[in-house]
Image (cartoon, rainbow, N blue to C red):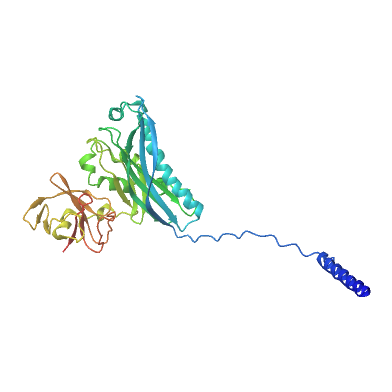
Amino acid sequence: MPRTRTTLLALTFAGVLALGLAGCGSGTEDPAPSPTTTPTPEAVEFDPRIEVTGEATTVLELTDADGTDIELTTPYPDVAVTGVEPDIADAFTSDVTDNLTNRVDEQLQEYTELGIPECADEVAGTDDPCLREATFEVEHADVYEDYGTVATRTSFTLGSRDRNNQVHSVTTNLRTDETAELSEFLDPVGDSRAVRSLEAAENWALTCGEETPEEYLAAVKGFYPSENGVTLLWSPNPTYSAQCQVDEVLVPWTMPEESEQPTAADVNGDWCPTEDSVTDYGCATIVFPTATFDDGSVWNLYGGDDSGDGGFSFSTDGAPFGTYYPAGIAIDTAGTVTDSPDHDRIWSSQSGMMLVRQ
């Protein structure tokens, strides 16, 4: 019995010793684990897309000369950019927001030298700020070649007589993240295409007699490039009737020589509105200088200068009538109606009338 116990103790000790040695290893160290590496993100395939998904707001503040606190709620577009590197997309959307809000704030701060009676009356006897809201609309949000542009218009009023209209545009090369200037696409003053396009604008002859085309083009406020050309933008103030009321002009990439322009007689014939024409006066027979519509009304027509983009503009008594475009020349209708460049057309951007030769 004692001998058997001794044998068992010896065996037990041997087993424990063996386990201990196994835990210490054979003396050869295991290889160190390989260092972890962060995978390199795959490059984004360049296929830029811009979408305005909604709007966001910020509140701009002002204390005017009379001590009235004003809060202007200012909306700006919520822009989504895909198909470009994420850092470029983020920088572009930030530029769009900053450009709009900073310029609206600059215009708001100009009121520090003025009293605003309407605001003062509204908050008299309280500690409340005078509350105002700006409005905005998206003029353009799209990509042309490597360039993305968001153009917007804003407006706000603080009193009953002030109007604060602005146009904002940001154009960026979405491949290189470089801000693009108008001069990369067009010299608005030195390019005859711009002068001809402005002179052909429907409101130019009616409201812009005090300025030369060169002066107005030098004061352009925004722009955007597209397949059709470069659209120049202004922000006329409707409060002042003497101010030129041209707010946008398309300058096409190429223009026909003036000798190739249509003449007044080319508009003669039968015309009918398209299905999506915003204004529908019925069909008309034109024998220049008159247009006779189906209802028997006769409109006098006056031939103006060439439209600057391959057409010939007409006016009627006291208002623009439209611009005649021969087949083969595309019209930028800004999505208002569908263009049919394989037909002769008469288009009025003011009334939305689109007539097609029958």
Horizontal side of 87 relative to 199 (left or right) equals: right
Residue 127 rendering spot, x and y as whole percentages: 36, 28
Residue 170 rendering spot, x and y as whole percentages: 41, 47
Foreground residue, 23 or 145? 23
Above/below status of 198 relative to 267: above
Foreground residue, 277 or 87? 87
Residue 200 rendering spot, x and y as whole percentages: 24, 47
Query: Which residue lies most toward the top here?
Result: 66
Q: Is residue 189 visible?
A: no
Residue 210 rendering spot, x and y as whole percentages: 24, 35
Above/below status of 237 relative to 293: above
Quadrant (top left/top right/bottom left/bottom right) for the N terminus: bottom right
Q: How many marks?
A: 0
Query: Which residue lies most toward the right here?
Result: 3
Foreground residue, 21 or 166? 21
Above/below status of 86 relative to 159: below
Query: Which residue lies most toward the left here?
Result: 296
Horizontal side of 309 relative to 183 (left or right) equals: left
- Residue 228, quarter of the rendered image: bottom left
Q: Is residue 302 visible?
A: yes
Horizontal side of 123 relative to 275 (left or right) equals: right
- Residue 156, quarter of the rendered image: top left
Above/below status of 150 relative to 43: above
Foreground residue, 300 or 138? 138
Quadrant (top left/top right/bottom left/bottom right) for the C terminus: bottom left
